[in-house]
């Protein structure tokens, strides 16, 4: 098999499936939604966006339903389970009271989300009181501990898979900050102790438990009473919870929705600072292209996905070649054979580590040095203890001295110089906005930089704007200034409609969800008197009072010139066309002896396309002649 140099040494830098856009299969997530279904979740209401009252149970269900819709599109191989506790009915493998694992037929309790699950879960509120019911699972005089049982059931559901190959999480929705408040004395202390131990056992198995508190109207959710100790929350995490609890109800729903999605690392890399000193870093893709899902081919009879297999066949015998093929590269009349290992070694540029080269002032880093979306770096002490401490010391020094680090990063297919820019943590009253860490910015080589070309040798020939025109343009810019602009405010309308159609088909919805195109200009805003006046003054200053007349005359003149040119070409082709016996040339196979210019005489005379290679022109002529 002959080698294709372009294939062996192709540049995979712009490949959308490169490592910094695709998450590893090891980051598959197993998630259990644990929802408090006590009567307090139904009786507690808060004002929503449409000024209607919405219960905390309704908020939790709506957030879960929305996350399932997003997950089935973006992360369809993740597995989820939905578990209610403080319920009247019970449904779980452990046969524990007050715990109900919600599911639909033909699906495991912990499995990938399906269209049927989403469709039926959307109507869970209508059927909940009849089929599942709500009751307090922790009451005086009873040893039942519904929270302990719920954590036990959730932990059992997450036994599938290894903590090294999957992220395991429990998301706990509740508005009760003191689940054992109605119990006193030794019984309360004993129940709290066993619940703390159950949570600790789950965390020791690699299961993270996250609390999503729902604040009641009369009092705020106090995490310090019980859940801070159960989850092992520290000061910074407590501050984040307090900021979350203090939000308005509609903002609270957005915060809950954000916390449903965990930031997952793309990969783990080793940062070599100097010989004998290296630390471990996790990489995160902050921005990535969003594309429609890939098409899956199905069998026409069974409707099951088709597995595509490739095999190499011998040209002489037609049998399947079992041994791996060998590749060769011609060199001086000799075929140089390469093995698979030799090819891999030739293509290998680096070991995949990040190696520090030195430091430069931040002023040396220009905007045009950023080739593609950066990668965010954060330390990890999972395998190299002390990585976070070294990273923090380096981060603080770079921030204080206003320097960025220059490093070499390469993988098996490419090598690249990168800049490491330290970023300080940014917080507001609503919590953390930007985390501390470093941005890995991909730097260009000298070959990648294009210098500005001079289109006009004499600068005097360039048009210059007058002071009045500059003032008029400045007025337009100030009038149409977008306040608080962010790319996060705009969704891709094509993708939104694509997924809306898929959702309507999968859930058998009668009507397709209405999608708002946020990229359409604001016609109402553009028609405000101040903007209209600024635009008119700008056009008047640039084009003058007779702008419309001049525009029409110019467009008509250009159209007339183009029309005259096409007419002249057609007349010349018609004259030259009569000099050939096209029928005899076609019958005798002599069309291929004519030049391309001569073949175009026939095509132009009959108003046929004249583009393409010679073979295509001949085929077009023969088709027109019916031969």
Image: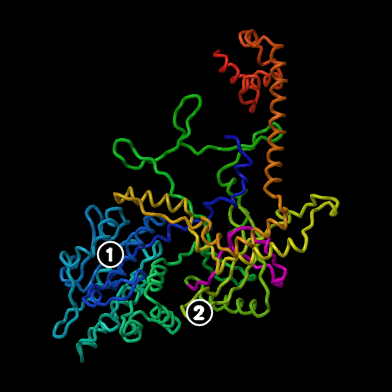
Does residue 28 appear to the left or right of 286 in the view shown? Answer: left
Residue 110 found in image quarter: bottom left
Closer-to-camera residue (625/278) = 625
Q: Distance from label 1 to label 2 (Cα)?
A: 33 Å
Closer-to-camera residue (332/458) = 458
Closer-to-camera residue (384/455) = 455
Q: Does dot 1 land on a helix, a strand or a loop?
A: strand
* Neighbour tally class for label 1: few under 14, some 14-19, many 20 plus, Cα within 10 Å: some
| Stretch in magenta | 352-381
Residues under numbered marks 1 and 2 in contact, where contact means CB atoms less than 8 Å apart: no
Is residue 357 within the magenta segment? yes
- For the C terminus, the quadrant is top right
The residue sitting at the bottom extreme is: 185
Residue 218 found in image quarter: bottom left
Q: Which residue lies under the disc numbered 2?
A: 428
The numbered disc on residue 82 is: 1
Does residue 434 appear to the left or right of 260 in the view shown? Answer: right
Q: Residue 195 location, x and y as percent?
A: 26, 80
Does residue 387 appear to the left or right of 545 in the view shown? Answer: left
Sequence-wise first label, 1 or 2: 1
Q: Residue 76 location, x and y as percent?
A: 37, 55
| Residue in view at x 17 percent, y 69 percent | 133
The numbered disc on residue 524 is: none
């Amino acid at each position: 098999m002959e080698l294709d140099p372009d294939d062996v040494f192709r540049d995979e830098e712009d490949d959308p499936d490169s490592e910094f856009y695709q998450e590893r299969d090891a980051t598959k997530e197993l998630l259990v939604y644990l929802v408090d279904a006590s009567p307090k979740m139904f009786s507690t209401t808060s004002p929503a966006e449409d000024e209607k009252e919405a219960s905390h149970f309704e908020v939790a269900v709506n957030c879960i339903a929305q996350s399932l819709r997003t997950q089935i599109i973006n992360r369809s191989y993740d597995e989820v389970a939905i578990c209610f506790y403080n319920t009247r009915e019970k449904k779980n493998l452990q046969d524990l009271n007050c715990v109900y694992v919600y599911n639909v037929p033909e699906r495991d309790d912990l499995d990938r989300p399906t269209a049927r699950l989403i469709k039926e879960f959307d109507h869970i509120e209508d059927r909940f009181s009849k089929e599942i019911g709500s009751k307090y699972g922790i009451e005086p005089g009873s040893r039942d501990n519904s929270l302990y049982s719920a954590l036990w059931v959730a932990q059992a559901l997450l036994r599938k898979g290894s903590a090294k190959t999957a992220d395991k999480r429990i998301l706990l929705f509740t508005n009760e900050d003191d689940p054992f408040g109605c119990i006193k004395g030794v019984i309360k202390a004993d129940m709290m102790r066993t619940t703390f131990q159950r949570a600790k056992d789950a965390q020791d198995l690699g299961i993270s438990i996250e609390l999503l508190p729902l604040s009641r109207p009369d009092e705020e959710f106090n995490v310090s009473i019980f859940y801070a100790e159960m989850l092992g929350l520290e000061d910074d995490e407590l501050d984040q919870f307090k900021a979350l609890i203090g939000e308005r109800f509609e903002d609270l729903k957005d915060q809950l929705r954000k916390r449903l999605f965990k930031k997952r690392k793309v990969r783990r890399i080793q940062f070599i600072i100097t010989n004998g000193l290296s630390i471990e870093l996790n990489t995160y893709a902050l921005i990535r292209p969003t594309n429609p899902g890939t098409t899956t081919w199905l069998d026409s009879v069974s409707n099951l996905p088709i597995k595509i297999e490739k095999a190499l066949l011998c040209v002489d015998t037609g049998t399947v070649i079992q041994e791996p093929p060998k590749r060769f590269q011609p060199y001086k009349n000799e075929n140089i054979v390469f093995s698979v290992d030799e090819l891999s070694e030739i293509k290998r540029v680096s070991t995949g580590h990040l190696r520090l080269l030195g430091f430069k002032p931040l002023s040396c880093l220009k905007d045009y040095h950023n080739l593609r979306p950066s990668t965010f770096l954060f330390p990890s002490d999972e395998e190299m203890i002390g990585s976070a401490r070294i990273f923090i010391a380096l981060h603080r020094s770079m921030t204080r001295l206003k320097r960025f680090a220059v490093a070499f990063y390469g993988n098996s297919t490419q090598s690249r110089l990168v800049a490491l820019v330290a970023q300080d943590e940014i917080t507001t009253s609503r919590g953390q906005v930007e985390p501390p860490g470093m941005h890995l910015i991909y730097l260009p080589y000298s070959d990648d930089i294009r210098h500005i070309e001079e289109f006009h040798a004499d600068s005097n020939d360039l048009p210059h704007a007058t002071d009045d025109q500059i003032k008029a343009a400045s007025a337009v810019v100030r009038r149409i200034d977008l306040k608080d602009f962010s790319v996060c405010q705009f969704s891709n309308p094509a993708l939104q409609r694509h997924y809306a159609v898929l959702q309507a088909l999968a859930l058998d919805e009668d009507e397709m969800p209405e999608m708002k195109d946020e990229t359409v200009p604001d016609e109402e805003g553009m028609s405000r008197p101040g903007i209209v006046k600024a635009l008119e003054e700008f056009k008047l200053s640039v084009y003058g009072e007779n702008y419309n007349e001049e525009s029409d005359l110019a467009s008509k003149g250009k159209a007339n010139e183009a029309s005259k040119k096409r007419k002249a070409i057609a007349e010349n082709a018609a004259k030259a066309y009569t000099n050939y016996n096209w029928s005899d040339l076609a019958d005798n196979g002599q069309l291929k002896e004519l030049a391309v210019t001569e073949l175009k005489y026939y095509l132009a005379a009959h108003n046929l396309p004249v583009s393409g290679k010679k073979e295509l022109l001949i085929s077009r002529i023969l088709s027109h002649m019916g031969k």
